[in-house]
Amino acid sequence: MPPRRPPIIIDIEASGFGPDSYPIEVGLVLDDGRKYCSLVVPRDDWTHWDPNAETLHGIARATLLAHGRPVFEVAGKLNELLSGRTAYSDGWVVDRPWLDRLYAAAAMRCEFTFSPLEMILSEGQMEAWSDTKRVLLSESQERRHRASYDALVVQETFERTRGAGKVAGGLRHC
């Protein structure tokens, strides 16, 4: 029997924490270990910016303008990578509105299912989650709070809590 693949994990960083916030970075790790991440250029009408959020993720608005991709490009790439599949988030309650906002701004339909990670966690995984994630983070040299790295940490925590062992090659962000 082939080994079970890990779930696809997606994470979104945003301009703030309230209803006026919008996605500024999307990162994901596929079930085969491939990664995708992109900064998002804010639309002209996306003006909310919370300095506390910037302190958390370390992404300046000027960085988005200089290095980000347009909303339609990011939404299109997500559809290309995830069409017909399911991606999971450990922050679904906040990530869902940001994903919806991305697709609305791109005037595109999201072609994949976006689900809370809790939908596939066993009771044992939930009990072991915090301690396992804490150990994983202590083993890592990375200290940034960015979408691609956060998605990788969630996927690795999922794997370790289900007893699948360490992902080959350890943690690597894009």
Image (cartoon, helix red, strand yellow):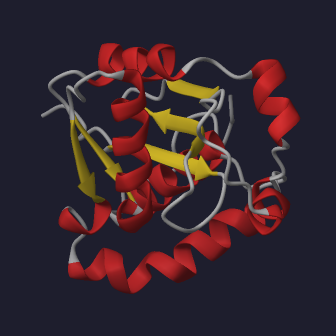
Q: Is residue 30 visible to the viewer in this orientation of the structure?
A: no
**x and y percentages locating residue 131 in the rendered image:** 55, 82
| Left or right of 115, for residue 104 | right
**x and y percentages locating residue 105 in the rendered image:** 42, 30
Identified at 84% across, 31% down, the residue is 63
Quarter of the image that includes the N terminus = top left
Relative height, residue 114 to residue 39 (above, below): below
Relative height, residue 159 to residue 23 (above, below): below
Identified at 59% across, 37% down, the residue is 45
**x and y percentages locating residue 50 in the rendered image:** 75, 62
Most extreme residue toward the front, as rendered? 45
Relative height, residue 49 to residue 110 (above, below): below
| Left or right of 110, for residue 161 | right
Identified at 21% across, 31% down, the residue is 112
State the residue in front, 65 or 168. 65
Identified at 54% across, 58% down, the residue is 20
| Left or right of 136, for residue 34 | left
Relative height, residue 23 to residue 119 (above, below): above
State the residue in front, 86 or 166. 86
The image shows a total of numbered marks equal to 0
| Left or right of 128, for residue 85 | left
